[in-house]
Image (cartoon, grey):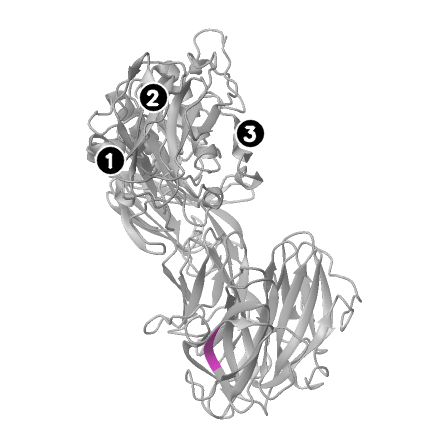
Amino acid sequence: MVAKDRHHLSLEHPPLRRLFCTSVLLSLFAPALVALPVAAEPVRNRPHPVSPTLTTLTEPSGTATFSTIGATWDRGAKGRVELRTRTAGRWSGWTALEAYDAGPDTGSTDAATASGQVVSGPVWVGSSNAYQTRTVGGAVRGLKVVVVDAGTSTADADPTGAPTGPGVASAAAVQPAVYTRAQWGADESLRSFNGSGCTTPDYGSTVKVGFVHHTDGANTYTANETPAVIRGIYAYHVKTNGWCDIGYNFLVDQFGRTWEGRYGGIDRPVIGAHTGGHNVNTFGAALLGTFTTTQPSPRMLSALQKLYAWKLARNYADPTGTAQLTSAGGGTSRYAAGTTNTFDVISAHRDAGYTACPGDAGFATMGDTRSAVKVLMGAGLVNPRSSARTAAAGGSGVTVAAGVLKTQQWSLDVRRKSDQVLVRTYTGATSTSLSQPVDLKDGAGVNLPAGAYTLTLSSNAASEVAVPWIGALDITSSSPPPPPAPAVTTFTPVTPARVLDTRSGLGSSIGATPIPAKGRVTVKVTGVGGVPASGVSAVAVNLTGIAHGGPTYLAAYPADTAWPGTSSLNLAKDQTHASLVVPRVGADGSVSVYNAAATSDAVLDVVGYFTASGGSSYTPVVPSRLVDTRTTTTPYVNNETRTVQVAGRAGVPSDATAVVANITVTGTSGAGLATVYPAAAQRPTTSTLNFGTGEVASNRFVSGLSGGKLSVYAQVARADVLIDVVGYFSGSGGTAFTPVTPSRILDTREANGVPGRTPVAGGSTTVVPVAGRGGVPADAKAVVMTLTTTGITRNGYVTAWSGVGARPGVSDVNTWTGHTVANLVVVQLGAGNVSLFNAGNSATLVGDVLGYFR
């Protein structure tokens, strides 16, 4: 079928080229000074926002000019779409339209608003006044052609005339000339076209890789037309693809000019939508045009190389080196979600996706580009880091390490943070790498006093100066002694009983009122709910929070201590969630619950207690899945209760008195709750787990067994339930529990428990030292801690295990895009360590110890 003519204005252009997406993921640093554009004459034409006109048509009609064109159609097409345009009375050749190969990551904000149809790439065709489409090889349903009139601005002819000020892209270090969004006439109101969630940019933690793309379309645009070309791509990406913004971070034209792409700051790790599956911790620069057979101009390549040199230098990357990225899936990614793969630091889009981008001629320049960028960077540091942020005065100190790009001299300054007084300098030279111990002494050999210090690593090779690295060092007066712990204890389960409910005032020290922000409630947990009035060292309680008006977190801890700065449960606005906690009880048998932010209600259901004798000891098992209704039975329906045989399965013996396990619900038809309790008991009016519609939610539980069985009730019309066993209590053998005042032993934001301040990469395993930290002795067999995940951009899970043998196929924390999620974990130690496997995208991990078994 051939569509009727569509009349518009026209500019002559060559035949349309085959559509290929050009996304280039590159990370760069540039040491050389590059002048910013300066207007030689008084500014006459100031840039201003230009609103492109985008029209979607099912049949050609009307008369309107356009300069950018593309199409959408339903999925499952058997044939292909071909299109041609008319410019200055002449028709171009027929060109096949292909599905766009740029795209967002699965689970990202862009993906959430993306079109559900097949979308071709936007093609610049110059000022045209008609188009025709045809289908070849079969039916193509739902075909719609999208034409964009990018509009005009009197400043298009002279973008260098834009005034300086808040609208100008800037960076902390010297940068190449970059024309701003204001200079190409970006209509910033478009960023809210697909919802208010799109107005705030998403950021990675650094830049590891820079991807190179081309935009496709005619190479015959003039210098004056460049802003209109970019405006057309911007409008198409937002209104047709359904993304939040233009997909590329930068665009480079054939005249050697670099243009700011996605909003958020050119000097920051803005997450774009250029390389599906690999947009986090990367950036994409697109060569404006088609470079299948046409070579990029020398000026274009020079601008590209300067851009990459600057970006990579700021992020301490080696342009001729490699980096690992974990795929999030999406777009035309070559790699399945969750897989970790190695890329050149400067890569072509085709290295990560099934695409020809940036064209064969563009791809042929990649080797020369890497070499040229390294020359431009000159002296440079690669992945500088400190072994720890905190050290005890008089102790062994820390070590600062880094790679280098070439032979250079370096110096490491230690300064007091309060007044930046220099207290020690280390110097050296290297051609490969450096590793410098910092022994916490001043130049005279005297121990540095406790306090905050900064570490500044600088290097140079003659006149070439590397971007310096600055780190923090906190020297503590001494290693804080662990708080006195009660004698080792044994566990006695009870049928779950409610001991606190701030909604009704039950057990609450503040009555029937929510806990205010930065407030706390105290509740007596001994002598109630089946817990003895004396001799109790700790309790196992299920803490449920109900947030009102905003996000917050709750923390349960001994009432005779101040809030220790830890968390037990994180809540989003208006969310109800639960988490098992095992706090030491205060001297008067009480526990406090602290509320960090938004006003919240709190509920405590006691499920057991620890005493010096008379209970059961704990034995960890290799985590294993006991129940999975998705594969072995059918989902729960109509508020159903099921009995689960535990003893004799998953390593749990017949004499077990209680089991420690994780319950997860998924595929929920609505909001609801689940309750776990001993099989012979009447179902209590408590909850083990609360969840929302469609949410994957989990919680650790400790439940007594009756005849080796427990009961699981789900208050929901439909849900699948999974139970993963990690250990059991019994009267023979095993280990005893010692509670401690909560202590943070892991925080990837603060280099606490890990070498650097970076999120844990998706698909990776992080080994966290536990023994000897947070009051946990060297001979501990297992640890009890609250594990919190945040900074999640794609749903996934975290598995905690000893690190010995194969990783178990279970989950301990189910991560949720855009949410902070916490769960209690009871983990067997391997050589004093806990191993954490992150199955989602990069994530921040936080761990707070509550006690240990030995």
Side (left or right) of 604 relative to 744: right
Q: Are marks 1 and 3 in contact (CB under 8 Å)?
A: no
> Upstream in the sequence, badge 1 or badge 3?
3
- Residue 123 lies, with reference to residue 525, above or below; the image says above
Q: Main secondary structure of the magenta part?
A: strand
Give the foreground label among 3 and 2: 2
| Residue 346 pos. (x, y %) | 28, 39
Q: How far apart are marks 1 and 2 (CA)?
A: 32 Å
Element type where label 2 sits in the image: strand
Element type where label 1 sits in the image: helix
Q: What residue type is labelled 2?
A: Val
Numbered badge on residue 125: 2
In the rendered image, the quadrant that contains the N terminus is top left
| Residue 165 pos. (x, y %) | 53, 21
State the residue position of label 1. Answer: 370
Residue 72: name its quadrant: top left
Q: How far apart are marks 1 and 3 (CA)?
A: 37 Å
Quick check: can you spot residue 536? yes
Q: How crowded is mark 1: few (under 14 residues within 10 Å), some or many (20 or more)?
A: many
| Nearer to the camera, 688 or 438 | 688
Element type where label 3 sits in the image: helix
Side (left or right) of 437 relative to 393: left
| Residue 241 pos. (x, y %) | 43, 37
Magenta segment boundaries in residue numbering: 722-727
Which residue is found at the position 67% from the left and 54% from the top?
A: 597
> Upstream in the sequence, badge 3 or badge 2?
2
Q: How crowded is mark 2: few (under 14 residues within 10 Å), some or many (20 or more)?
A: many
Q: Do the residues labelled 1 and 2 touch (CB within 8 Å)?
A: no
| Nearer to the camera, 64 or 230 | 64
State the residue position of label 3. Answer: 189
